[in-house]
Amino acid sequence: MTETPLRLFNSLTRQLEEFRPIHPGEARVYTCGPTVYNYPHIGNMRAYVFADVLGRTLSWKGYHLTHIINITDVGHLTDDADAGEDKLEKAAARSAQSIWDIARHYTEAFKADVRALNIRGPAQWTVATDYVPQMIEFAKGIAEKHCYELDSGLYFDVSTVADYGRLARASTDEGESRIDPVAGKRNAADFAIWRKTPKGETRQMEWDSPWGRGAPGWHLECSVMSGAQLGFPFDIHTGGIDHREIHHPNEIAQNQAHCHSDASGANIWMHNNFLVDRTGKMSKSSGEFLRLQLLIDKGYHPLAYRMICLQAHYRSELEFSWEGLGAALTRLKRLVMAVEKLKQVAGDSLHDRSSVSVIRSQFDLFEAAICNDLNTAEALLWVESLPALKVIGPVEKYVGIQRMDAVLGLDLINLTRADLRIRPKTATISEAEIEAALARRKEARAAKDFATSDAIRDELTASGVEVMDGDPLGWEWKLDHA
Ligand code: AMP
Ligand code: ZN
């Protein structure tokens, strides 16, 4: 384990804290997973890039990492608190499909985005519907002291635990007053941990429980799955900043009740800020919304989006734009080209890396940035400045970049320049055709036949290909995207 202590911002104490593992040498992390009623948008994926950088950092620091991400396939209502319909039941009714098929389809779509963004798979994907018996047991254990029953379900009384809502920034009561109050709730912030199926209705997903047939509440799911997989207390709980207001305060209240303790269940609670998009395309209800596949269809390599995430601190709001994506892609290209050049210069000596020690100072700077609450924006600068250093050779530089990329996850060692070419799905011309046309154009130019050379260029332009003579990055052509 290296020496720079890892300091992380704990939303609960509102300060930077040194990471001290509960179990020596181990790091146990739980990340709230997606609700699989639709495709994730790229904002959702920011939450998992952030959790991945955290996990990679912990592994890099030498901790044995157990990372759990759940799949919410039941219980998340259209409002984060207690109103509205179950998101999955609603999607199933709309599309006249089985809820299980919907969950399966969107879970696979989510995992495809995870892979495309080079996010490491967790130790376990816990699926909420696999844990319903444990949820019922958990609820039984806290029902008598902390809950009460209404016609609509079993409710958690937030006044029965110490300091409810200490994590939230907004006043929780205020947050609750904008949604339909449930008649009979003792406190506005009380929430259902078990929702009974209303009389005369059937749900596709329902289970028997001591409180009637119904389904678990979303907040209950995460308490149960995190505790079952990691044991209370565990080290770090992560999620998007919206979870800081309702979902996580409710998880904490349940954990306190379950553990008979005032402690929250996790030592550190971390939250990524939002990716925002001024065009409004990130709403899952809008037709063409900003999902990773849209970026890919327009021709961008998905890791350009990972680069966008890394360029900002995870606690800062980040605005998405197509120009920004283009700039991030160029930045990634420059790094990949630098690595390709190092490979070339180093040649065979790359195979003998046994005695390579990358200069400490550069590495220390990188590590200091990452250990300062995962400052990836600064860490990137240390990776980028490595190839130009005078004092070390190409093999050391290559190994240095490889080691740093273990944290950033940009796949700098395997990506090639060609992988990063913009390739819109709508392109009507193949790369082989473009290359062949450019070869003919080269010949024409060599023969000073500029009429033919210009004609070829015009044909390519008509097919959406921009010929890039003298491009500083050495690209000869680019496909314009729709
Ligand atoms: P959901 O599928 O709605 O439960 O959300 C999955 C994850 O994405 C949660 O951790 C959310 O907090 C997070 N999230 C939702 N919207 C955004 C956004 N615009 N930017 C960053 N994270 C988000
Ligand atoms: Zn959760």
Image: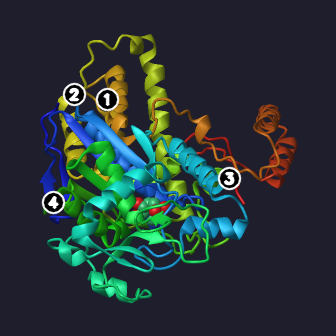
Q: Are marks 4 and 3 in contact (CB under 8 Å)?
A: no
Give the foreground label among 3 and 2.
Answer: 3
Check disc 2 and give the amino acid type.
Ile
**Circle nearer the N terminus (1, 4):** 4
Check disc 1 and give the amino acid type.
Gly
Q: Can I make out residue 313 in this image?
A: no
Give percent across and percent down for residue 233: 20, 50
Q: Are marks 2 and 4 in contact (CB under 8 Å)?
A: no
For this rendering, which residue is in front, 113 or 147? 147
| Disc 2 to disc 1, C-alpha distance | 8 Å
Check disc 3 and give the amino acid type.
Asp
Residue at 41% from the left image edge and 68% from the top image edge: 211
| Disc 4 to disc 3, C-alpha distance | 51 Å
For this rendering, which residue is in front, 231 or 397? 231
Q: Are marks 2 and 1 in contact (CB under 8 Å)?
A: yes
Determine which residue is flagged by label 4. Answer: 260
| Disc 1 to disc 4, C-alpha distance | 48 Å
For ligand 1, the image quadrant comes to bottom left
Mark 2, secondary structure of its residue: loop
| Disc 2 to disc 4, C-alpha distance | 50 Å
Give percent across and percent down for residue 289: 62, 66
Above or below, 163 against 188 in this view is above
**Circle nearer the N terminus (2, 4):** 4
Mark 3, secondary structure of its residue: helix
Determine which residue is flagged by label 2. Answer: 359
Q: Residues within 10 Å of mark 4 (few under 14, many from 20)?
A: few
Determine which residue is flagged by label 3. Answer: 297
Q: Is ligand 1 within 8 Å of the beta carbon of the residue shown at mark 2?
A: no
For this rendering, which residue is in front, 273 or 222? 222
